[in-house]
Image (spheres, rainbow, N blue to C red):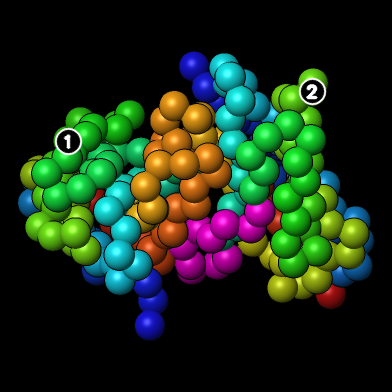
Amino acid sequence: DADVTQTPRNRITKTGKRIMLECSQTKGHDRMYWYRQDPGLGLRLIYYSFDVKDINKGEISDGYSVSRQAQAKFSLSLESAIPNQTALYFCATSAPSGSGVEQFFGPGTRLTVL
Amino acid sequence: GDSVTQMEGPVTLSEEAFLTINCTYTATGYPSLFWYVQYPGEGLQLLLKATKADDKGSNKGFEATYRKETTSFHLEKGSVQVSDSAVYFCALTRMDSSYKLIFGSGTRLLVRP
């Protein structure tokens, strides 16, 4: 079974709709992240969480919110989706801070906003 | 601010050819450097890493050496296979913010039989 899972894998929605993307992990990591991937731009950090009570904005948090329901669950919400939020979204986890710490990524959610 | 620059893709090679994907970075201090790979339809996975100058990361026949004097971390493989077709991302983290991965734009590799 995958260590980091994301649901749904694909979603098509309309402008103005609220949508939630969910992430679960079985790695026992405290740190979790949400990224979006756009063609030619690599991945950019939306939000990150160091534990259940510690949530921080990344470089592109506008238009998004998150919820850390438990150590293993981290959800990303788009309160009112817009077309330029069409992208591939990845959840990731990592162990606590240290040099060269690896992040473990989920399979991604492809979101299309019409 | 910190940044990573990768060569533009796609890179198209024949099987058993030599691969180089260039990566240079801008960062203060001594970042850790990574190569992640994304196979079609999958998430990213760590391919190799190096945490200090002159370190060489290696995995699955791929290698990259942390060159502080040229601020580079080029990915190489002596003989590519069709199964190496994927998108490769160079990335860095800083010691004082090791949670924050800064990615290059990615380089797509296509290996033909």
Alpha carbons under labels 2 and 1: distance apart: 39 Å
User: Label 1: which residue?
Assistant: A63
Please name the residue shown 25% across and 66% down the image: A24
For the magenta stretch, what is the residue range?
B39-48
A13 versus B24 height, above or below: below
Asked whether residue B106 is in view, the answer is: no
- Which corner quadrant holds the C terminus of chain B? bottom right
A66 versus A7 height, above or below: above
Frontmost residue, B113 versus A6: A6
Q: Is residue B65 magenta?
A: no
Name the secondary structure under disc 1.
loop
Determine the chain carrying the residue at label 2.
B
Q: Is residue B44 magenta?
A: yes
Circle count: 2
- Say whether residue B52 is left or right of residue A75: right
Name the secondary structure under disc 2.
loop
Determine the chain carrying the residue at label 1.
A
Please name the residue shown 64% across and 58% down the image: B47
Which mark, by number, is residue B70? 2
Please name the residue shown 19% across and 59% down the image: A71
Residue type at numbered disc 1:
Gly
Q: Quadrant of residue A81?
A: top left
Which mark, by number, is residue B100? none
Tell me, yes or no, whether the two marked residues, 2 and 1, touch with CB atoms within 8 Å: no
Please name the residue shown 79% across and 21% down the image: B69
